[in-house]
Amino acid sequence: MNKGKLYMLPVPIGDTPVRDVLPETNLRVIGSLEYFIVENVRSARRFLSRAGIDRPIDTLRFAELNEHTPPAEVEALLVPVLEGCDAGVISEAGVPGVADPGADVVALAHRHGIEVIPLVGPSSILLAVMASGLNGQSFAFNGYLPVRQSDRSRAIRHFEKRARTEGQSQLFIEAPYRNLKLFEDFVGTCSGDTKLCVAADILQPDQFIRTAFVREWKGHAPDIHKRPAIFILGT
C-alpha cells in the first residue's frame, strides 16, 4: 500500500484575510484533504471555514497534537497516512513545525519514510527579521527565555554577547501577557548601544515594528501588552 503525504499548512497570523497571505495552490491542497493533524480543532475548523473549502467541515477528520499530547500517542496520528491517506498539519498561527508541536509528527514521518511537503505561508520569525534591519544572514531563534529572574538575566547577557561578538541576530518570543516584563528585562540588562527590535501584531492593521538602540528604548516602552510579539537583539 502506498503511503500518504504529510502537508505542512501555514495559516494567517491573526485575522489577516486568508487570500492575502496564502497562494491559491495552498487552498487547492487544503480542499483536497480530509484528514488534519492540528494544534487546536476549534481554531483549525475556523481556518478551514475562512479558507472557503468546498466540502462540509463536519465530514473531515481531525486529530489534536499539542503540548498536552503524550509522546506515546503521537505515533497513532500517522496511522491514516501510513494507510495511504494524505494529511495536513495546522498550527495555531503562522507556519507549523516551527516553535510548534507539529515538529514531533514530522520527525516521525521521516522515520516512517513519509513524504513531507511544506507549503508557502507567513512566518512571524522571518517577517520580523525582514523588517528589523538587523543581520538577516546569521540569526538564531531562541524561543522563550527562563522565567527565573537570575537565569533570565544570565541568558540575556549570553545572547547579547553572541549578537555583539558574532554579529548574529538573536530572536525571542514570550507569552503575550509577559511581553512588557521581557522588554523591561532587555532594557535593564543590555548595553545601551545594543539594538533591540520589537515586532508586534505582524501583518495586522495595528502592526508595530521598531528597531532602536537600548538606550533609546529607555522610558519609551511600546504598547505590546497581550499582543503577539517577536524580540530581536542585534548590532
Image (cartoon, grey):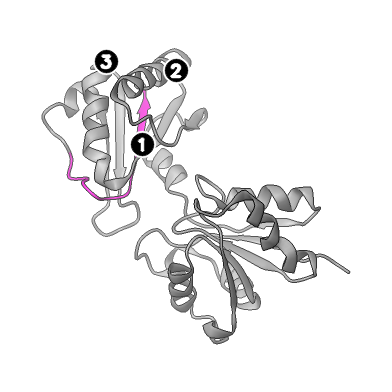
Q: Quadrant of residue 77?
A: bottom right
Q: Is residue 213 visible?
A: no
How many angstroms separate mark 2 from mark 1 (CA)? Answer: 18 Å
Q: Quadrant of the C terminus?
A: top left
Q: What amino acid is at disc 1?
A: Ser
How many angstroms separate mark 1 from mark 3 (CA)? Answer: 19 Å
Q: In this figure, which residue is indicated by the disc labeled 2?
A: 162
Badge 3 marks a residue whose secondary structure is loop
Q: In this figure, which residue is indicated by the disc labeled 3?
A: 191
Magenta span of residues: 222-234
Between label 1 and label 3, give the one nearer the viewer.
Answer: 3
102, 171: nearer the viewer = 102
Between label 2 and label 1, give the one nearer the viewer.
Answer: 2
Q: In this figure, which residue is indicated by the disc labeled 1?
A: 132
Q: Quadrant of residue 187?
A: top left
Q: Is residue 11 visible?
A: yes
Q: Mark 2 and mark 1 in contact? Answer it, CB < 8 Å.
A: no
- Image coordinates of residue 24 in percent, x first then y, are 56, 71
Mark earlier in primary sequence (2, 1): 1
